[in-house]
Image: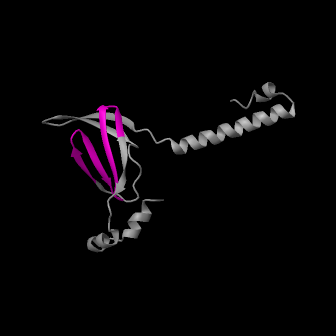
Amino acid sequence: MVLVPAPSFVGTAALHQALALGGLVAATAAGSLASRVTPETALHSNSLIKTELYNLDVHTYANAFPKSAVPGGALARIGDRYLVVSGDGHLHVFSWEVLDHVTVSTLPYRVPINGEAFSVAAGRPWAHHFHANTT
């Protein structure tokens, strides 16, 4: 929409056209960089599941954690926060003050996982699991 009326604002001077083109290229590059640097925002949704004994208020946070190359993981409560270990061993701590905002911090540590030994014990190839989820 910006490009349609642009010729009437820029004019025919070569310097003005070059400055406008440079500004457009810079804005495009800045937008592309910002989309890669800015973490994805966790999308919050909730639903009510009615059962015979209790009604469950389920809150879901999509894109709250970086994608793991390997499925699985673990979750543990630590005080008022939670520790998440992803399938590929990355550690994340999360908490929330209000239900619609999750605060996630990625820790600089990684749990060493011996995937080859585990795959032999489980009878499943580790490389297949790893590569199937990275594409």
Q: Position of residue 132 (x, y in %)?
A: 43, 63
Which residue is rendered at x = 81% and y = 34% of the image? Answer: 17
Q: Residue furthest front?
A: 108
Q: Quadrant of residue 34?
A: top right
Magenta stretch secondary structure, dominant: strand
Along the horizontal axis of the image, is 26 left or right of 129?
Answer: right
User: Does residue 57 show up magenta in the picture?
Assistant: no
Q: Is residue 84 above or below residue 21?
A: below
Residue bounds of the magenta highlight: 74-103
Q: Quadrant of the N terminus?
A: top right
Taking the view exactly as shown, the residue that stands out farthest to the top is: 9
Relative to 104, is 108 above or below? Answer: below
The residue furthest left is: 53
Give 47 or 60, whichever is nearer the viewer: 60
Residue drawn at the location 58% of the way across and 43% of the way down: 33
Q: Position of residue 49 (x, y in %)?
A: 24, 36
Asked if residue 76 is among those painted magenta in the image, a careful observer would answer yes
> From what the image shows, is residue 46 above or below residue 91?
above
11 or 30: which is nearer to us? 30
Using residue 135 as the reference point, say whether residue 13 is left or right of it. Answer: right
Rendered image coloring scheme:
one colour
Residue 92: x, y in percent? Answer: 34, 48
